[in-house]
């Protein structure tokens, strides 16, 4: 049996086939746009949720609004300045270890939490802290604890206002190595994954992969499960990455901060580092700020000393507090 299909029917068939393909493509494009839009909204919502984990008050100094918290109501004031990307988890570990024995002052550098964005140099931040403390009406006597980038602010404060410092603990200090080849390598290693996280992170893809257990971007970070979730979501947020990049870039390009030998006299000072970092970043020289100084070494594999070695930091800080208070009382 023979069938005859006229040319008009064939053309209509071809037209419908083309239109079906076009509609399919349009549908796919619409679905893709909807997914990207949903991912964008999810990313910004989650970023705000985790940014708001940084609680506290705000005050404005030199046109910058700083967010800060104070834990404790008696005893000497310990000013804590953490590493790049420090999370509330690290702060809480220190609070738990020091409860009732001192007042812990935490603040967010520009770009973290609800502190206004815009990089300030460590010296500018140290000056802001000085005027902030005057505004609070506090006795201008402090113990400082600074880790990594936070050690830069602490070092500048000691250089500017040594008479206000009762004692100090440097953790993995970086000031003498700023702008060096070692610091540039340090920055490259720490920021190598940022371009992909930033690009895909605009639509929440890394956060989705992390939160649903498809990929783990922070395998080397040893936290409990709930802590890992907080750490990962903070470090995948666009504004958080932007601030961390700015601080790493500063460390790799800035001029070294000079060490004022003997600036603290015989006030207690500890340097906490590892054998590897001590040689890479010339960290043992920071002990020369005081004639009563000690260097404490942790394992080379430890990076986030405040979080991973709180069992070491707590006793050392308590010892510095006890010595500083006794020394200050003898001189009054």
Image: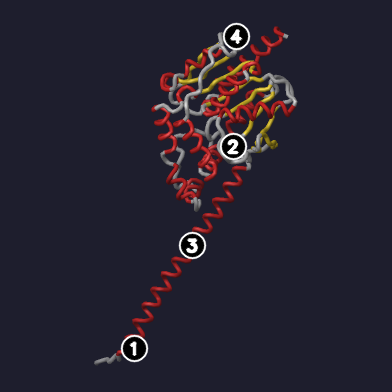
CA gap between label 4 and label 1 equals 99 Å
Of marks 4 and 1, which one's residue comes earlier in the chain?
Answer: 1
Q: Comparing marks 1 and 2, which lies closer to the viewer? A: 2
Q: Comparing marks 4 and 1, which lies closer to the viewer? A: 4
- Residue under label 2: 110
Question: Taking 89 as reference, is 164 above or below it?
Answer: above
- Residue under label 3: 33
- Residue under label 4: 266
Is 82 situated left or right of 60 in this image? left
- Residue under label 1: 9
CA gap between label 1 and label 2 equals 70 Å
Q: Secondary structure at mark 2?
A: loop
Question: Taking 221 as reference, is 305 above or below it?
Answer: above
Q: Nearer the viewer, residue 31 or 277?
A: 277
x and y percent of residue 148 in the render? 51, 27
Of marks 1 and 3, which one's residue comes earlier in the chain?
Answer: 1
């Amino acid at each position: 049996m023979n069938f005859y299909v006229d040319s008009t029917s064939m053309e209509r068939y071809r037209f419908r086939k083309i239109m079906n393909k076009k509609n399919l493509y349009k549908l796919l494009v619409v679905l893709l746009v909807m997914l990207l839009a949903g991912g964008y909204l999810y990313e910004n919502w989650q970023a705000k949720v985790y940014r708001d984990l940084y609680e506290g008050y705000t005050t404005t100094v030199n046109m910058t609004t700083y967010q800060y918290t104070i834990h404790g109501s008696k005893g000497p004031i310990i000013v804590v300045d953490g590493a790049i990307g420090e999370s509330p988890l690290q702060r809480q570990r220190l609070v738990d270890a020091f409860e009732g024995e001192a007042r812990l002052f935490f603040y967010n550098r520009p770009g973290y939490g609800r502190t206004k964005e815009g990089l300030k140099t460590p010296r500018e931040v140290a000056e802001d802290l000085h005027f902030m403390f005057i505004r609070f009406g506090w006795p201008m006597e402090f113990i400082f604890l600074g880790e990594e980038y936070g050690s830069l602010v602490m070092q500048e404060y000691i250089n500017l206002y040594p008479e206000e410092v009762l004692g100090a603990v440097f953790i993995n200090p970086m000031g003498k190595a700023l702008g060096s080849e070692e610091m540039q390598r340090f920055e490259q290693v720490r920021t190598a994954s940022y371009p992909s996280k930033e690009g895909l992170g605009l639509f929440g893809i890394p956060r989705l992969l992390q939160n649903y257990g498809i990929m783990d971007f922070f395998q080397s970070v040893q936290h409990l499960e709930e802590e890992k979730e907080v750490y990962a979501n903070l470090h995948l947020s666009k504004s958080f990455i932007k601030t961390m990049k700015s601080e790493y870039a500063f460390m790799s390009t800035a001029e070294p901060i000079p060490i004022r030998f003997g600036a603290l006299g015989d006030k207690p000072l500890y340097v906490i580092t590892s054998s590897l970092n001590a040689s890479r970043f010339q960290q043992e020289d920071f002990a020369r700020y005081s004639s009563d100084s000690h260097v404490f070494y942790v394992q080379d594999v430890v990076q986030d000393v405040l979080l991973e070695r709180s069992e070491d930091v707590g006793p050392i800080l308590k010892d510095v507090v006890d010595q500083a208070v006794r020394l200050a009382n003898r001189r009054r």
